[in-house]
Amino acid sequence: MAIFNGKTVEEAIKAGLQALSIEENQAVITVLEEAQKGFLGIGGHDAKVEIKIKENDGERAANFLNGIFDVLKIPATTNIVENGDKIVIDVVTTSPTEIIGYRGEVLDALQTLAGATANIGNDEYKKVVVNCENYREKREETLKVLAQRVADKAVKYGRKFSLEPMNPFERKIIHSALTDDSRVKTESQGAEPNRYVVVVPENYKEGTEIEVYGKQKNPTNDRKSKGDRRDRQGRRDRKEKSDVIKLEKKTIGYGTFLGNSLKED
């Protein structure tokens, strides 16, 4: 921001816009003092205005994130690496784990807040992507590999495989990775935030499905729901669980974290 003077408010604004090389619609203008002529040349003064260059959507979102990092005392800065139909904000930090969080949960939360901030007052919504240490690209590659491995196992065993809950972006990666694989089809089931992808092989037969879950986001509720199912289903539920365990003796559970795999012993 900068302060400019002129014999009138209009002259002060004009001088400021010229000095900053911007148009009036690109500026936030605050009139600090109106011009005063004084009496017999005594006590008069020029008009004074403050002119600040208006932030664009990406800058507004990036500055908002910088404010969050300051409050949380996380050493991080932001770079707007792309600005147009999509705003990409890259976070540079010496503490990437604090920014990314477990499987990107913190990064996703920051992205949601940045998106809301960037779109304040907009008629058309702009997509905002917040990235750190190329996490988005690494995660996408991990999920593509996971999708292929799950598809191979689903076909091999003729069973349905249910992945752990994912956000819409990650579910879309799984669907897209297998869209051209004629051996399987994918579908999303469940309700947010626990919606998940199911991989169904072409050779699937009713009664032979297996559900494979990763770590639940709400283990308390999960234990409660499992207890309710056992109460309702009794021995039938324990029998089905026993059948699953027999198969899992030959496998390692699937998750979506980098490095997890479902391999034969």
Image (cartoon, rainbow, N blue to C red):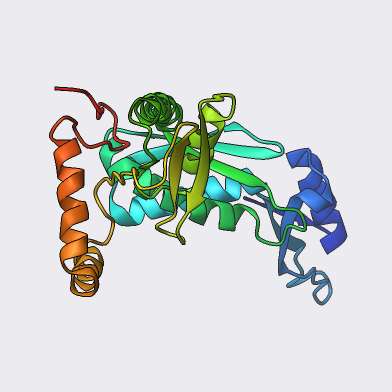
Q: Residue 135's image quarter?
A: top left
- Identified at 56% across, 32% down, the residue is 176
45 with respect to 194 (left or right): right
Of 240 and 198, nearer the camera is 240
**Residue 237 seen in the figure:** yes
- Identified at 59% across, 24% down, the residue is 180
24 with respect to 78 (left or right): right
Residue 174 in the image, given as x and y percentages of width and height = 48, 35
Q: Is residue 208 above or below residue 41?
A: above
Residue 161 in the image, given as x and y percentages of width and height = 37, 40
- Identified at 23% across, 69% down, the residue is 233
- Identified at 44% across, 54% down, the residue is 195
Q: Is residue 223 above or below residue 23?
A: below
Q: Is residue 98 above or below residue 13?
A: above
Residue farthest toward the bottom in the current orientation of the protein = 39
Of 228 and 191, nearer the camera is 228
User: Exactly how many numbered labels are in the figure?
Assistant: 0
Q: Residue 36's image quarter?
A: bottom right
Q: Residue 265's image quarter?
A: top left
Of 194 and 188, nearer the camera is 188
111 with respect to 240 (left or right): right
Q: Is residue 142 above or below residue 53?
A: above
Residue 192 in the image, given as x and y percentages of width and height = 46, 60
Residue 97 in the image, given as x and y percentages of width and height = 27, 39
**Residue 79 seen in the figure:** no
Of 168 and 58, nearer the camera is 168
